[in-house]
Every structure is written in C-alpha cells, then in structure tokens.
Amino acid sequence: MKKTWTRSRQKSVWGVLFVLPCFLIIFLFVIYPLFYTGYLSLSDYNFIYDRAPKFTGFSNYAKMFLDSDFVHAMKTTLFFAVFDFSLLMVISLAIALLLFFCKRGTWLFRTAVFMPIVVPASLACIVFSWIFSENFGLLNYFLGTALHLPALARPWLTQPGSAMSSILVVNLWCNIGFETILFLSGLQSISGDVLEAADMDGAVGWKKLVYVILPNLKETYVVAGIWAIIAALKVFVEPMVMTNGGPGNATLVLYMYIYNNAFLYFNMGYASAIAFVLSGMILFFSLLNMKLNSEEAER
Amino acid sequence: MKRFFCALLASALVLSLTSCGKTEPAAGSQPAGSGSGSKVLRVGGESWQVTKIFLEDAAKAFMKDHPDVKVEIQTYADPTVVSNYSINWMKGETPVDLVMIDGASFAEQFIGKDLIYDFDKDLNFFSNFDKSKFVPSAIEMSRLHDKQYVIPVISEITAININTKMFKEAGLVDKEGKPLAPKDWEEFYEFAKKLHKVKDGKVVQQGATIQWGKDIHGTVLGVLQASHKTLYQDDGISVGFDNPEFREILSIWQKGVKEGVFSQETFADYDSGRNSYKAGKVAMLVESGSRWIEAGQTLGKDNVSVLPIPGADQNGSVGYVNGVIVPKCSPNAELAVQFIQEQLLGEHVQTSTLNQYGKLPVINEYYAMAEAPDWKNLKNSIDKSVTYPVYKDLAKFIKDLQSILQNSLSKGTSVDTTVQQLQDMVKSLNK
C-alpha cells in the first residue's frame, strides 16, 4: 500500500513539473493581466502623467454611460454585430452545405473559400481600401465603365452608410472561411446511418435538410456561434485600417474606442473599464447562444 | 536513467521561460569587430525619417569624422514604439541614445516623468551652437513648457501644392505665366471649380483635395491662424473656432464637398490626396507643403509648385517639426549632441531633405541653397508660422476635431452646430 501511494505521488510530482511551464505562461500572460486590468478599471490612471493608479471604485464605469462617444461606439458595435453575426452564420452554413453536397471540383471551391483565412486581415483591408477607392478604385471602375452603371458608383469609405457596409463586407470575407470549416466538419460528423435512414424514409431534398441535417448540427451551432459572436463584437482591424473610425465617427466601434483611450490618450483606467464591459458583453451573448442551443437539444 | 532524463527535460522546459527575451548589448559596449575603446551611438527613427532625413548618410559622415565611434541606426515601424521606450527609460535602461520624433508635442509624454534632457539647461546645447542660426519659428515650435526638450531637425507647414500644368490649362496664371495664389477661400473654391473636370459621370481631374484625415489639425489650425491671425480665444489658451472667418471657411468647405469639387477621399485614407496628386489627378492639394517636391519626380519639376494658403502670407500658418530627444539614461548624451550639431543640423542633411523631399530646413542659411525658387512663395508663411497648442489632451483634441469636422462635412451639419460642438470639445479638454 505504501509502495503504491509513493509511486502514485511520484507520478503526480512529475505531472506537476511538466505542467508547470504551461501554467506559468498562462499565469503571466492571462491571469495576472486579467486581474491587473480589473484593478486598473477601478482606478484613475493616466500612464503619462500619473506615477501610480489611484483607486476610485466604480467611477470609470459610471462615467462610461455618460460618455456620448462610448454610447455611440456601443450602438455602432451592436448594430454591426447583429448584421455580421447573422450574415456570417447563414452564408457560412450555406457554403458548407454546398461543399458537403457538391461531388465534383470540391477541392477548388474549398481552396477558394478557405484562402481568406491565410491572408492577414490588415493586408486584406489595405487591398480592399484600394478597391473601394472613390475615384480610382476597381469597384467603381467596374460599375461605371464595365457595367455602365455609374449611378451605383459611390464614395464607399467616406460616406457614413456605405462605410459601415464596406467594413461588414470585408469582415465577412475574412471570417467566412473559418466558419465554413466549422460547419463543414459538423456536417461531416453526421452519421451516415442517419442520412441513409432519412433517404429510406423518403426525406429528400429540402425536407432532409430541414428535418435531419440542420437539427444534427446543434453542437456546431454552439461553437460556430461563439466564434461568430466574438468576431462580430471584437471587430477592430477593418475600421482601424480602412476608415480610422470615420467618416466622423460613423464606424467607431468599441474595440477601437478602447484602443484610442489606452494608446492615444493613455487613460489606462478608463480603457480597462471599457474592456471589461466589452468582455462582459461577449460572455453574455456566448452564454445565451449556448443556452438557446442546449434548450433546443433538450426538446 | 529514465528519471534523470525526465528531470533534465522538465528543467529545460522551465529554463526556457527565462531565456525568452532578447538581451540588448549594454550601452557603450564594444561591438564585435571594432577597435578597442570605440563607442556606439544608437539613433532611433521611423523608416521614413531614416530615408528623408538622410540618417544613414549622417551616420557614415559622423563615423568618418570620428573613427572611434560607431553609429547604429535603429528603425522603428511606427510612433507607438517610441512611447514604449518610456518603460525602458523608467528602469534606467535605453536601447537608443537619441530618438527622432514626429512633432514636438510627442515629447510631452516623457516630460511628466522627467525622462528626457532639456538641451539648453542640461546639455548646454547652445554654448557651442549659435541659436540665432535657427529659423525662429522652428525653435519656438520645439519648446515645451518653456524648455528646449526637443531640437528641431526639419519642419513642415500647411500649404497648397499645385499642378501648374492644370493651372495653365485653366488660365489661372498671371502675365508671366506664374500660377495665381487664391486670395481667400471663396477664390480657392472658384479656382477648384474651374480646375474640376468630370467625364461620363467620372471625376477625371479633382479640383481640390484637402487633408481631412488624421492630420486634419494641421489643416484646420493652419487655416484658423491664416484667416484669424490667432489660434486662441481671449484666454490665450483655448483654441477658438467661433469667429466669422472660420465660419465662412467651414461654409465654403461644405459647399465644395456637396458639389464634389473638394474631395472627401482623405476621410478614409490619409495618404489618398497625396497619392492622387502624385498621379496627376488633383489640381490643388492642401496639406504639408512638401508634397509638390515628391510629385515633381512623377509629374516633372516644371509641372508642380507650391502656394501659401489664403491669408498665410500675412498671418502665417501652423507648422510642426520633426526633432530629436535624448533620454536621461543614455550614457552617450554628449556624443548625441555632437551628432546633432555636426550632422543633423549640417549642410548635407538640411539641404538634401529640402531639395529631394521638400522638408523645410530649420537653419536659416540653407534656404539659399534651395534648388527650386518656388520656396520663396512660402517664405512669409514660414517666418510667421506658429505651433500647435500643447495640451495634455492633444491626442483627444485631434481625434475629436477629426470626428466633428468629418461629420459636419459629410452630413452637412449646420455651421452653428459644428462651431458649438468644437467649442464645447475644446472646453472639455485637459489643457
């Protein structure tokens, strides 16, 4: 008994030693910054002018909701997120279904769909900025000269409405590939027996899709949904590179507002508080997504 | 044996965490392959500064004159890297001995924690370099809190970069064939209308592009100074937008944008105006008065020129400098001063940057070595130019100014509302 206990304890010690480096990394780069940011969010701290943070309680959180720029950024982010999430999920699922059912040339279509994943987002945004350029961009040239529809050509990035749409398009282009992978793997994990049984029962075409395939993707909806929520609420690269939050503040999103407060104005305390609010929103919607899908599964 | 290897592996994994960072060589240490007793001067600059301020040439010339010194140019990608230096400097370490900064106000972030030298009091810079050699506005622009924390190396002012060929085609020249300078903003708008060309619903020649992107403060404050003779309200501290001149200018800008005569492309892309100008698509570009020299390389030197913005000849404009700072923890401060005096403020750097890139020298005598005579058009503007307000919340001022003005121009918000928003914004700032 004593010998077994000693051997078991030895194994535990070795296990701890091997896990220790990973734990240290997580502690240093995740847990400690999380708690320190939490402390900063309860403090007044300008990195340039203050020697140390000054604890002020929840004043940063209270100030936030009286800040018109924060409220505007919040509204812009939520507006963007609703459209981005919906379109991302629907389009990715549609493409995944096409790839799943397509028998020929799938390698070509898969490559085309997955290619945006390997392109850095900032690089894609620079290229799209040129494409969307008002006077010299490819899009307006195509609409005006090739299709002879000059009325459709517009200043895509310098008008408030079209600027947001342009950012949405680029964000979808960047993220659809990954979401499609998630849905495709979900589709491929559906048991062949289930699909065969559906065929034998006469569930074909649309009925098979709605009553057999889509219900079997519940777990995939959770994972894909969480990822889409994060991508939608944490949008940053596109407005930063393509419009710098403009025209005016039409595309100023929450993540950009955090960046401005932290790295342009050096208000670390306030920026930390906004970061926690954004994290809270992401957590809330992710949990909501999980709950809705688990309730459906239980039914 | 198995246990021994397991222990070895675990130790290696733990130790690998401690060797993650790169160790910088100690300041002043001997670089490999150099002679004994040699010093290393580390100069930091953005990539564009290394090119346009000829830092590599300056380094080579300095090393030739001082064989016991090695000058290392360290290029940083963008200004946020310089902000991160403060973390090192607070610990008493520095990877650089002198740093080029874009705008004197950038040094503000280091002053609060006493991290950089006052060139005058701490380093006696002017004891062997005559202060009167400097262009007065340049030295004034680089003073912060009445101290010389920054030594200017180049300066820029807001001006109108023009395509002279387009001006001649539109008949906007005098009897000698020289382009006419618009006297006021109404005339500027009329010029832009004449210069603007549209074919099959597509703009083939833009009348005017005004910098309304992230350098909007240069444009707006330059225009304010030129039209109203001062940037400030009666308190001498708060920028004042509520005056008839600025209201009129704002109204003209809105009219120009609505008619498409003034382009909005700089809202999204700060460089778009400059790129379109260099491509020969823009007749007038209102931003830094150095763009015409760049465009001369693509359009031909005879087809480009520069004019002062309306009112700048009489009242000046707003300028800004690129300069150098020296951190207090640098062990080579004296060497850094020598490098600045001998090379950065020397003939080669000052004249080359003017003639090749259009960056204005900060030393008076080098204007006589300008290859293009067009610089005379800006002489009065340069002499009378003033600097930005040095607010603690300058970054917020710039961001909010951009936001309010772009909203005003794109949505057509009334002039009264826009001016009120600007005044309220200035009032809310930490000055």
Image: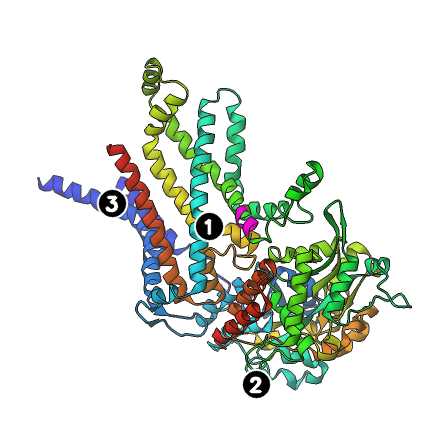
**Mark 3 Cα shell of 10 Å, populated few (<14), some (14-19), many (≥20):** some
- Residue B368: name its quadrant: bottom right
Q: Amino acid at mark 2?
A: Lys
Name the chain letter of the residue that bears numbered label 2.
B
Q: Earlier in the sequence, mark 3 or mark 1?
A: 3
**Mark 2 Cα shell of 10 Å, populated few (<14), some (14-19), many (≥20):** few
Query: According to the image, label 1 marks what residue?
Result: A235
Residue A190 in view here: no
In magenta segment, residue B191: no
Foreground residue, A86 or A171?
A86
State how many labels appear: 3
Residue A56: image location, x then y, percent: 32, 71
Q: Is residue B78 left or right of residue B211?
A: left
Quarter in which the C terminus of chain A is drawn: top left
Q: At numbered mark 3, what does the secondary structure look like: helix, strand or loop?
A: helix
Query: According to the image, label 2 marks what residue?
Result: B121
Q: Are marks 2 and 1 in contact (CB under 8 Å)?
A: no
Query: According to the image, label 3 marks what residue?
Result: A14
Q: Nearer the viewer, mark 3 or mark 2?
A: 2
Quarter in which the N terminus of chain A is drawn: top left
